[in-house]
Amino acid sequence: MPKKGHLFVTGSSWMLTKLSKAAQSLTGKFILCAAGLLAAIFVVEIFVISTRSNTVISDLAVRHSREVGAHHASNVENELNRRMAAVEAISRSFGMMRRSWVVDRGAYNGIMRATMDEDKTIFSVWAVFEPGAIDADADHPDDVGSTDTGRFTPLWHRDNGQLMVDPITDLSDKNGGGEFYGRVLQTKKPLITEPYVFTQGKVSTLMVSLVAPVVVDRRVIGAVGIGVPLQQFAEDLGRVRPLETGTVSMITNRGNWAAIADASALGKPITTTDASLSTILEPAKNGQALDFVAEDSDGRNQKFLVPVTIGATKTPWSLLVSIPVAKVFEPAVVIRNLVITGKLVALVVLTVTLAVAGLVIMRRPLARTLAVIERLAQGEYEVEVVETGRRDEIGQVNRALQIFQKNLLRVKNLEEER
């Protein structure tokens, strides 16, 4: 019993032989030329369509991703500016109260508590006044929001849903005091801090503060701030997936992660996660928008740097939108594959159609004409010449063949008479 492999080889050899013979015929040559021309046209069409679709789709994807970044940058900007507006309102209130010689510390505490009561989303509100800025500190040791020396440094925060107030006792640079208080004294302008850790019992929270100075007669007597947990932004932006697989992260003015999917990277320099991001540190610091392609651990990615302006702080943050390049061009690849498939199907259908048409219109009539010629060559001069009524070239050949046949018969008759 023949093996399947042997039958396949034999069948393939027979098919190739048939195709080779068919290609040598006039009809076969015509079909091959027509199919080749169609294939060349289809290749050009596929190239043009693929190139154009790549350009259009990538532009749309990039524009969509940029708009996603701008949308979420606007949301973050609005949220931070809302907090900053509240901070500046408190600082102005404190300044006016001090200019009016309001020395009741309960009034200052009341404004901070009222702010947290009105907005349940606020994590903490704090104030730090210079020693003796309100009244004699020595008269208020251990008052609400005061240290054991009487300095007024209240920190209002939430603990298991309850409002609590504690004095801020450590303003050293080691504990972040230089970041959220010392800078305000120097610049006399609102600011947003870099990330710092706020510890409450056994729970530590990575935060930033929006800070505004309390100014009386052009002199900074203290600072007011609202604490904002970074985890809030990390969770909100972590749910955003541009083009299904993209990510949105947030970078501080000094190039630290303020929001990123990897929670362990929060507050750390962006270069610890991806060294190639060192190129965007300066644009991020200056609040510049930037589009670029970068190679990282996830492959080749299209990235967008979108600035976030925070009030009058002059320290913009940035949103970093990252999308895999393969995802950007995925629709174009799908379209290209569909076009190639469609063109291949069309090429096969047209080739088969041409083959059938060639068989009916050319090959069979020519075969009948060749059969007549062969019989005439064998001396069968009485054979009937068919299809002389056709108005195409085959009809012309058959009519000429009919005349040739009559001449042969005439010669034959003359020879017989002789």
Image: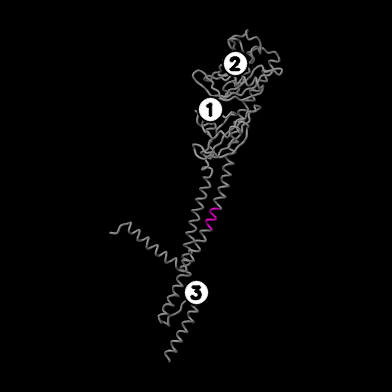
Please provide percent x and percent y for residue 111: 63, 18
Please provide percent x and percent y for residue 137: 63, 10
* Location of residue 342 with respect to 92 vertically, above or below: below
Q: CA distance from mark 2 to mark 1?
A: 28 Å
Which numbered dot is residue 154?
2
Which mark is nearer the camera, 1 or 3? 1
The quarter of the image holding the N terminus is bottom left
Disc 2: CA contacts within 10 A as few (<14), some (14-19) or many (>=20)? many
Q: Which of these two is toward me, 29 or 388?
A: 29
Residue 74 can be seen, yes or no: no
Which numbered dot is residue 304?
none
* Location of residue 389 with respect to 163 vertically, above or below: below
The tag earlier along the polypeptide, 1 or 3, is: 1
Report the magenta residues as a range: 41-47
Disc 3: CA contacts within 10 A as few (<14), some (14-19) or many (>=20)? some
Q: Name which residue type carries label 1.
A: Lys
Q: CA distance from mark 1 to mark 3?
A: 86 Å
Mark 3, residue position: 394
The quarter of the image holding the C terminus is bottom left
